[in-house]
Image: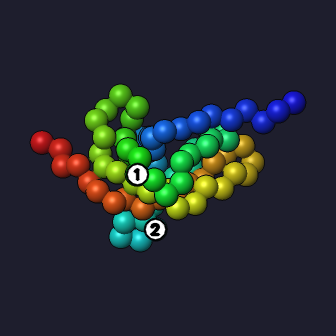
Amino acid sequence: MGMPLEMNTMIVTKGREQRLEENLFELVKEGYRLYPIEIPIDVKKTIDCDSSGTALIKKVEWQKNTTSITYQLVSLNTTN
């Protein structure tokens, strides 16, 4: 039985991100997910809302059917 894997091309936080440093965050998602590393990708609060910024993913860890990503926010989109 293979490990189910989901490819993600954006970070969807659902407000669950934890701030580690000023612009460094950690987010734990259910399941095993692949993310592009060290290239700019959109950060969104939910899949349907506008992008809240751009991030570079620095680290991805898989354990116990969860994916933990550490990302650096490199730009922030201001909301009106």
Label 1, label 2: how far apart the Cα atoms are: 19 Å
Which residue is at a point 75% across and 48% down the rendered structure image? Answer: 64
Vertically, is 2 above or below 53?
above
- Residue 53: image x %, image y %? 31, 49
| Residue 15 appears in the picture as rendered | no
Judged from this view, the residue extending furthest toward the bottom is: 21
- Residue 10: image x %, image y %? 45, 41
Q: Residue 68: which numbered mark, if any?
A: none
Label 2, residues with CA under 10 Å away: few <14, some 14-19, many ≥20: few
Identify residue type, mark 1: Pro
- Residue 65: image x %, image y %? 72, 43
Tally of numbered discs: 2
According to the picture, the residue beneath numbered tag 1 turns out to be 40
Vertically, is 26 above or below 41?
below
Identify residue type, mark 2: Leu
Q: Residue 20: which numbered mark, if any?
A: 2
| Mark closer to the chain start, 1 or 2 | 2
Of badges 1 and 2, nearer the viewer stands 1
Which residue is at a point 31% across and 40% down the rendered structure image? Answer: 51
The residue closer to the viewer here, 46 or 61, is 61
Where is residue 76, by image quadrant? bottom left
- The quarter of the picture where the N terminus appears is top right
Under tag 1, what secondary structure?
Answer: loop
Which residue is at a point 29% across and 56% down the rendered structure image? Answer: 75
The residue closer to the viewer here, 25 or 35, is 35
- The quarter of the picture where the C terminus appears is top left
The residue closer to the viewer here, 39 or 74, is 39
Its colouring scheme is rainbow
- Residue 11: image x %, image y %? 45, 44
| Residue 25 appears in the picture as rendered | yes
Judged from this view, the residue extending furthest toward the right is: 1
Label 1, residues with CA under 10 Å away: few <14, some 14-19, many ≥20: some
